Image (cartoon, helix red, strand yellow):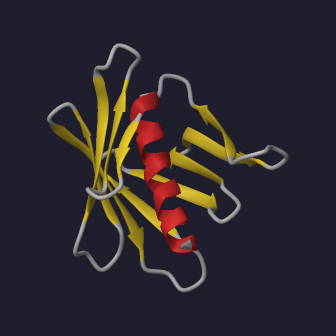
Amino acid sequence: MKSSHSEKKLRLYDLQGHELAYIEQQLLTFLPKYLIYRGEEEFAEVVKEFSFFHPEYSVNGPGWQVHGDFFDHDYEVVDGERVIASVSKEWFTLGDAYEILFGAGVDEIAALSVVLVIDACIEAQRN
C-alpha cells in the first residue's frame, strides 16, 4: 500500500506490484467524497452524509450501507442482510489495530477500500 497525502490519493498493490484498487478524494466538495477504482472502472463512490448526531456513509455503486459506531471503529458494511465486512478495533495493542472480517464470496479488495475510506474520514474528523 502506498499513499501520497499531498495528492489525496491511495493505491493498493499486491506483492507483485500490480495495482488492486485506487482511491481518490474529491476535493472542493461540501462533505468528504471518495471515488474507488478497480482497474480503469469506477467501482464505488463513498460519501460522508450530513448528520448532527453521528456520522453516516453512503456507498454508491454496489449499493452497500454502513452501520455502527464509527468513533469506536465498530461497524459493518452490508448489502441488505448480507454482511460485506465487519470492522472492530483491537483495544489493547501498542498501536491502532483493527480486525476486519469479510463475508463469504465478497470482493475483499473492494470491501477493504471502503473501510480505508471510512477510516480516512474518521481520522480527518479527529484532526
Q: Nearer the viewer, residue 5 or 75?
A: 5
Residue 33 in view, yes or no: yes
Q: What residue is drawn where x is 41% and y is 68%?
A: 48
Q: What residue is drawn where x is 47% and y is 28%?
A: 106
Q: Nearer the viewer, residue 9 or 61?
A: 9
Q: Nearer the viewer, residue 116 or 4?
A: 4
Looking at the image, is 118 positioned above or below residue 95?
below
Q: What residue is drawn where x is 81% and y is 50%?
A: 91
Looking at the image, is 69 positioned above or below residue 29?
above
Residue extending farthest to the left is 40
Q: Which quarter of the figure is the N terminus placed in?
A: top left
Q: Position of residue 83 (x, y in %)?
A: 57, 40
Q: Quadrant of residue 85?
A: top right
Image-based side of 106 in relation to 53, left or right? left
Q: Which quarter of the figure is the C terminus placed in?
A: bottom right
Image-based side of 66 in relation to 58, left or right? right
Q: What residue is drawn where x is 24% and y is 68%?
A: 27
Q: Position of residue 2 (x, y in %)?
A: 37, 37
Residue extending farthest to the right is 92
Q: Quadrant of residue 26?
A: bottom left
Residue extending farthest to the top is 16
* Tally of numbered discs: 0
Image-based side of 55 in relation to 14, left or right? right
Q: Position of residue 104 (x, y in %)?
A: 55, 24
Q: Position of residue 92 (x, y in %)?
A: 85, 46
Q: Nearer the viewer, residue 58 or 1?
A: 1
Residue 80 in view, yes or no: no
